[in-house]
Image (cartoon, rainbow, N blue to C red):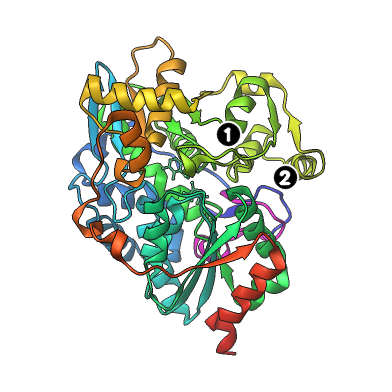
């Protein structure tokens, strides 16, 4: 059975059910599996005959152990992926010779976050229902996690959900997708700051052990291992449809919090032959600078037309650092303290040179041009995040014959202004969201101040009112 250890080495070792409900480790670290489940070539090949939900159950069950029965878990993956509008759940489209798009936006809120959050909502129900427990979810979003988490948790009796987003720094569609959900367990907070401020507040709430215990705080961000875990599946299914395990595949991943690309790294650790993992950033390029120089250094967050990637402190990067330093929790703690006190740290480039990662960034103009020429050349309308992945993928791919798959992380209609500016085409929202702009909104705007946000949450968390 896989157990979960903290990247800082000081928190209790947990089982899967505990890790899902716990979120951030009590030593401030992130949980990772103690060992990676391994899949043989024949097992990987066998995915070709499974539908997406069955492939998810097959690949993920080793992470779960006896926390949930196999039949209950299979029922959950079946239900989670029935909410997707495409039968293949994550279809592949071809852009050119050996060049593909993995369409991750066919879930209810039109971004890749649905792939994990539709499943996480069901995991919460199952794990809380069987214990008669309730939780208070506190999450930070730069636009997409928030709406996907709210969709997955709305109306669930065992959960109150508080989502912090940076005021004025998400697209109007993204904001409305969150703020027009009026269920009484949903609370939207617009913070007068950037995404890094929101994420730092969420982590600070977890690190206040009294607050977290009193409210039974839980995480829907990729702090939560289940988020990253669910994202591993599509690397395998798409790899297999392109010839894996007999052929290696490369992936270009639009990146911000490093969760999605870390899931690709996990897939490679589990046996999928991955030629390259290309980390694609917008001008908030801390990750790209790191992979090209070895220096991880914070700078201010700049608003861009790919707002979901306007991030400079990448939460899951700590999980990668843990492996890079031989799973030494003390070394990771030291680096994280340096990040807080000195604003950054460096690692020896020799640690990076042998890996499968490469990285680059896209300017605003390059992103717009990529949206435009992708429509012209391949008749495909892509969103600005996907365009960042396409631009950097083309630049960083090596000259092997491995197919290059760019992760298309959001539907173009979530970012109509940028898409229209690039192409003159106004992307329409799908039918279930067609009245989004006439729906009533509910949110509160709060200053970038931890104690104000904590008081707001304490006053509304039903878990406290019930005591
Ligand atoms: C549309 C979109 N693309 C890319 C990303 C970056 O993914 P990650 O934060 O997992 O690196 C995000 C946000 O997470 C997103 O919402
Ligand atoms: N881009 C994300 C930021 C949060 O990332 P997460 O994967 O840790 O939830 C968003 O859209 O909110």
Viewer-nearest residue: 80 or 429: 429
Q: Is residue 14 rendered magenta in the image?
A: yes
Residue 413 in view (yes/no): yes
- Considering only vertical position in the picture, is 385 above or below 122? above
Which image quarter: residue 83? bottom left
User: Residue 32 placed where, x, y %?
Assistant: 57, 48
Q: Is residue 68 left or right of residue 79?
A: right
In the rendered image, the residue lying farthest to the bottom is 467
Near mark 1 (Cα within 10 A), the count class, few <14, some 14-19 or many ≥20, is many
Badge number at residue 226: none
Mark found first going from the N terminus, 2 or 1: 1
Whether ligand 2 has any atom under 8 Å from the Cβ at mark 2 is answered as: no
Viewer-nearest residue: 5 or 442: 442
User: Residue 379 placed where, x, y %?
Assistant: 20, 26
Which residue position is annotated with label 1? Answer: 284
- Number of numbered discs present? 2
Q: Is residue 426 rendered magenta in the image?
A: no
Residue 250 in view (yes/no): no
Q: Which residues are magenta?
A: 12-32
Near mark 2 (Cα within 10 A), the count class, few <14, some 14-19 or many ≥20, is many
Which residue position is annotated with label 2? Answer: 329
- Indicate the secondary structure of the residue bearing disc 2: helix
């Amino acid at each position: 059975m896989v157990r979960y250890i903290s990247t800082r080495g000081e928190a209790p070792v947990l089982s899967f059910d505990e890790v899902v409900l716990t979120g951030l480790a009590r030593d401030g670290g992130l949980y990772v599996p103690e060992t990676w489940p391994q899949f043989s070539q024949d097992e990987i090949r066998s995915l070709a005959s499974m539908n997406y939900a069955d492939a998810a159950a097959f690949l993920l069950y080793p992470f779960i152990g006896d926390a949930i029965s196999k039949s209950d878990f299979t029922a959950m993956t079946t239900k989670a992926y029935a909410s997707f509008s495409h039968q293949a759940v994550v279809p592949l489209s071809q852009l050119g010779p050996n060049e593909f798009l993995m369409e991750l936006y066919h879930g209810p809120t039109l971004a890749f976050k649905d792939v994990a959050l539709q499943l996480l909502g069901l995991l919460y129900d199952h794990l809380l229902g069987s214990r008669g427990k309730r939780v208070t979810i506190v999450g930070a979003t730069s636009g997409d996690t928030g709406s996907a988490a709210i969709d997955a948790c709305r109306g669930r009796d065992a959960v109150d959900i508080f989502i912090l987003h940076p005021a004025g720094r998400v697209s109007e569609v993204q904001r409305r997708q969150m703020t027009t959900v009026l269920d009484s367990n949903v609370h939207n907070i617009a913070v007068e700051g950037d995404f890094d401020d929101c994420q730092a507040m969420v982590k600070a709430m977890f690190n206040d052990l009294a607050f977290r215990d009193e409210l039974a705080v839980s995480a829907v961000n990729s702090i939560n291992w289940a988020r990253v875990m669910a994202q591993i599946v599509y690397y395998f299914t798409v790899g297999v449809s392109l010839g894996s395990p007999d052929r290696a595949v490369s992936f270009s991943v639009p990146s911000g919090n490093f969760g999605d690309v870390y899931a690709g790294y996990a897939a490679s650790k589990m046996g999928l032959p991955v030629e390259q993992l290309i980390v694609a950033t917008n001008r908030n390029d801390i990750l790209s600078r790191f992979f090209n120089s070895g220096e991880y250094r914070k700078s201010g967050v700049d608003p861009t037309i790919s707002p979901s990637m306007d991030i400079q402190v990448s939460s899951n990067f700590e999980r990668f650092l843990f492996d890079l330093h031989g799973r030494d929790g003390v070394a990771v703690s030291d680096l994280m303290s340096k990040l807080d006190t000195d604003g950054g740290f460096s690692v020896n480039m020799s640690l990076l040179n042998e890996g499968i990662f490469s990285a680059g960034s896209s300017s605003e103009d390059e992103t717009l041009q990529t949206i435009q020429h992708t429509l012209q050349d391949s008749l495909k309308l892509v969103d600005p995040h996907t365009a960042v992945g396409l631009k950097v993928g083309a630049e960083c791919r090596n000259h092997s014959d491995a197919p290059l798959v760019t992760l298309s992380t959001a539907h173009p209609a979530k970012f109509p202004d940028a898409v229209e500016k690039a192409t003159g085409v106004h992307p329409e929202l799908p039918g279930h969201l067609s009245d989004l702009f006439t729906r009533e909104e509910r949110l509160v705007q709060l200053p970038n101040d931890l104690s104000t946000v904590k008081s707001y949450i304490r006053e509304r968390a039903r878990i406290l009112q019930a005591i």
